[in-house]
């Protein structure tokens, strides 16, 4: 059967896009259409395989407790043996579906979006590698394999954010993304090394058995350190405060890349890692608290920035940070199900929102400022409809996807901590407001620029198809997950009961509607002036508009700290390292200068020395003959 | 007073010393070659003298001398040819100026 084949050959899922990368990169790069065809084909096959794996999973009842594992020895160094392989449980299967679906749709979209770009082939090569890395990450059986793909994902994001490498801002953004996530990756690497040293294994299945036993014997001290270090990785990768700064700048890449990074391939890697290593985190309540608060704060903080941004993709970027904060919050309060449910629905509606934004920018000649758009409802009805679905989904309006997943998170938060619940609800309200602002200003308000308005048009069918599919998913995935028992599969420990707490659901929905109403009054009906509000809130508005000056603070810190350290190291380098090396060189030079004086080129001097040598040798031999009686 | 081995060796030693002095101290390359030749012949005298004063002579010393003279001739021929070439090249035969091999 096909699904047996898919399960047995799950390693093909990341391998096929990787092959597409190699083929395009080495052979067909200069043939744009062929390259796109190869990339889309490979993605489609790996999508089919992912579906097969998911079907097999349901058919054979593979659960979190009894995953399907296939591995072979990768390397053997001394007593350390590292495997590589595939680990399939419901978590993996869900991620496989999300990643392969979104990356397939994004690639189809890119066929239309990137048309005419001179890096067409290169773009598809990178996209394929990106998808391959993420699929490999999802299938990892141990921390090391995961780390390898984790870094590959980082590399791909660097390549794609800096895709327009001839633009300074793109280069800077790529570097920023790479280096910021590197800070997180360093923590993760330290955590992994400590795990290896302490337990002698990095295998998820083995660690799951060892760690609870270890904690009951040795206490939580060491594990807390390890878990916090591991969590630094997700902070960097998933754009949590304070390492979120790279994510908004990642907008410099082409829009399909943003969709891919924000929805499926890059930022959710952090959430997935925490979910995968949940057996470790759940044992450590204080670390869970840290995760929950980092997530909750990030959600609120990013939403407050998104309030005042004007670039369409930047608003979406901050909303991604905010939504990722939600997922972390859910993990922190112990609900793996809620977090991954939101991860799935978010992947669909965020990809949808980004692709819509791409379509809008495409139509407006790459204009990103929403206040220079307006009135696009009539010009781009399909884009408007799909974008509206996306906005309703993210705002948590029933029955769209975001409602169910957000409700799960709010419910989970409310059961653990009231402050976190209030923070999350407030964030939901803010989310609804700024998304409504984005939608209303772009599509409903009066056109701001008549000329670009006249040129606006619906995108090509390659771009519309993914929009429609994603819109459909953004409508049904929440309800489907709710009804079909998402929590019975993707869970940690006991099966999760899908339930809707009426108070929470109704209150958050009402808040969302209020937010919509306020946004409508400000931006469409213009009953309240947004400028007056900005003036009245004064410093708050300024803080939000300038992203709380985080970038500036970092810059100043880097100046002081890095430059200071650099000065010390410079001194050591010049006077100690170079001093030793140069000193040695001078010593040798001096000696050879003295010796070279003997090499004066005068044959007669040489002969003189030679004669002296002979005389000394003869005298020496005679001395020996005389003293030792010919014993020489 | 009959001439003995000691006299011959003394003569050879003097001749060698003069040759050595010439080879080391002279500026003219021809004079240097002449000094070398003197040292060579001092050695030849030693050979002949030892041959003469050995109780049972087998002419080895004399043979060696003939051999050494032959080699000496070849050496002088090459030496003078080199001196000639050097003069052609550098327009000098002063050995002090021939210090291209200076380190």
Image (spheres, coloured by chain):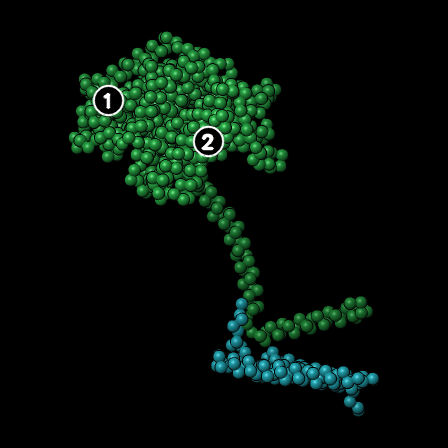
Chain colours: A green, B cyan
Q: Quadrant of residue B74?
A: bottom right
The residue closer to the viewer here, A530 or A111, is: A111
Vertical placement of residue A393 versus A85, above or below: above
Residue A55, image x, y percentages: 46, 22
User: x, y percentage for residue A526?
Assistant: 19, 19
Report the disc number at residue B96: none
Query: Which of the labelled discs sits on residue A13, or is there none?
Result: 2
Identify the subunit bearing mark 1.
A
Residue sitting at 47 percent across and 26 percent down? A2
Number of marks: 2
Earlier-in-chain disc, 2 versus 1: 2
Q: Is residue A579 left or right of residue A351?
A: right
Residue located farthest toward the left when viewing the structure as drawn: A450
Q: Is residue A153 above or below residue A60?
A: below
Quarter occupied by residue A304:
top left
Q: Give the residue number, with chain letter if any, for mark 1.
A: A440
């Amino acid at each position: 059967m096909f699904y047996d084949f898919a399960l047995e050959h799950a390693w093909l899922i990341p391998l096929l896009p990787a092959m597409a990368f190699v083929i395009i990169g080495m052979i067909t790069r200069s043939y744009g259409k062929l390259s796109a065809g190869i990339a889309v084909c490979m993605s489609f096959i790996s999508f089919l395989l992912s579906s097969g794996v998911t079907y097999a999973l349901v058919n054979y009842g593979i659960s979190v407790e009894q995953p399907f594992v296939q591995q072979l020895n990768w390397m053997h160094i001394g007593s350390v043996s590292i495997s590589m392989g595939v680990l399939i449980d419901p978590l993996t299967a869900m991620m496989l579906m999300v990643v392969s679906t979104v990356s397939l749709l994004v690639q189809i979209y890119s066929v239309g979006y990137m048309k005419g770009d001179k890096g067409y082939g290169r773009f598809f090569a990178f996209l394929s590698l990106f998808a391959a890395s993420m699929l490999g990450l999802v299938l990892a059986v141990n921390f090391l394999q995961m780390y390898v793909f984790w870094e590959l994902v980082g590399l791909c994001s660097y390549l794609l954010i800096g895709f327009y490498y001839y633009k300074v801002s793109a280069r800077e953004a790529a570097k920023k993304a790479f280096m910021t996530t590197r800070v997180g990756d360093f923590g993760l690497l330290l955590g992994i090394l400590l795990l290896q040293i302490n337990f002698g294994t990095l295998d998820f299945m083995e660690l799951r058995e060892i760690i609870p036993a270890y904690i009951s014997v040795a206490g939580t001290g060491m594990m807390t350190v390890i878990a916090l270090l591991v969590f630094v990785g997700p902070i960097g990768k998933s754009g949590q405060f304070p390492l979120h700064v790279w994510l908004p700048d990642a907008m410099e890449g082409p829009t399909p890349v943003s969709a891919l990074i924000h929805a499926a391939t890059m930022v959710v890697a952090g959430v997935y890692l925490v979910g995968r290593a949940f057996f470790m985190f759940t044992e450590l309540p204080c670390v869970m608290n840290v995760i929950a608060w980092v997530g909750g704060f990030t959600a609120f903080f990013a939403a407050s920035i998104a309030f005042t941004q004007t670039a369409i993709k930047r608003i979406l970027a901050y909303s991604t940070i905010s939504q990722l904060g939600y997922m972390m919050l859910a993990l922190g309060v112990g609900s793996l199900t809620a977090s991954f449910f939101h991860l799935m629905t978010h992947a669909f509606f965020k990809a949808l929102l980004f692709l819509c934004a791409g379509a809008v920018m495409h139509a407006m000649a790459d204009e990103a400022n929403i206040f220079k758009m307006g009135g696009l409802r009539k010009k781009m009805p399909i884009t408007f409809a799909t974008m509206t679905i996306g906005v309703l989904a993210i705002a948590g309006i029933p029955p769209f996807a975001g409602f169910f997943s957000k409700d799960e998170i709010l419910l989970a938060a409310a059961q653990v901590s009231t402050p976190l619940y209030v923070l999350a609800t407030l964030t939901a309200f803010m989310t609804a407001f700024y998304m409504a602002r984005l939608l209303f200003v772009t599509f409903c308000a009066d056109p701001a620029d008549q000329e670009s308005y006249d040129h606006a048009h619906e995108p090509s069918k390659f771009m519309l198809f993914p929009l429609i599919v994603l819109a459909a998913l953004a409508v049904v995935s929440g309800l489907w997950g709710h009804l079909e028992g998402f929590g019975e599969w993707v869970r940690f420990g006991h099966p999760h009961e899908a339930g809707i707490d009426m108070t929470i659901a109704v209150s958050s929905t009402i808040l969302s509607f209020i937010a919509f109403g306020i946004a409508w009054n400000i931006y469409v009906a213009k009953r309240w002036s947004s400028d007056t509000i900005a003036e009245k809130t004064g410093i708050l508005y300024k803080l939000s508009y300038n992203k709380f000056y985080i970038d500036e603070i970092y810059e100043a810190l880097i100046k002081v700290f890095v430059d200071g350290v650099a000065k010390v190291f410079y001194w050591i380098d010049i006077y100690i390292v170079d001093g030793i090396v140069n000193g040695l060189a001078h010593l040798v030079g001096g000696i050879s200068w003295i010796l070279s004086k003997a090499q004066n080129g005068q044959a007669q001097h040489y002969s003189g020395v030679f004669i002296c040598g002979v005389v000394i040798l003869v005298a020496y031999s005679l001395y020996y003959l005389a003293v030792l009686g010919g014993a020489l | 007073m009959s001439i003995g081995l000691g006299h011959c060796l003394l003569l050879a030693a003097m001749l060698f010393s003069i040759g050595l002095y010439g080879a080391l101290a002279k500026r003219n390359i021809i004079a240097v070659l002449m000094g070398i030749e003197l040292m060579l012949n001092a050695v030849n005298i030693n050979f002949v003298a030892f041959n003469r004063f050995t109780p049972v002579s087998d002419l080895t010393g004399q043979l060696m001398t003939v051999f050494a003279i032959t080699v000496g001739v070849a050496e002088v021929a090459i030496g003078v040819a080199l001196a000639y070439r050097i003069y052609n090249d550098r327009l000098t035969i002063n050995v002090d100026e021939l210090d291209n091999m200076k380190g």
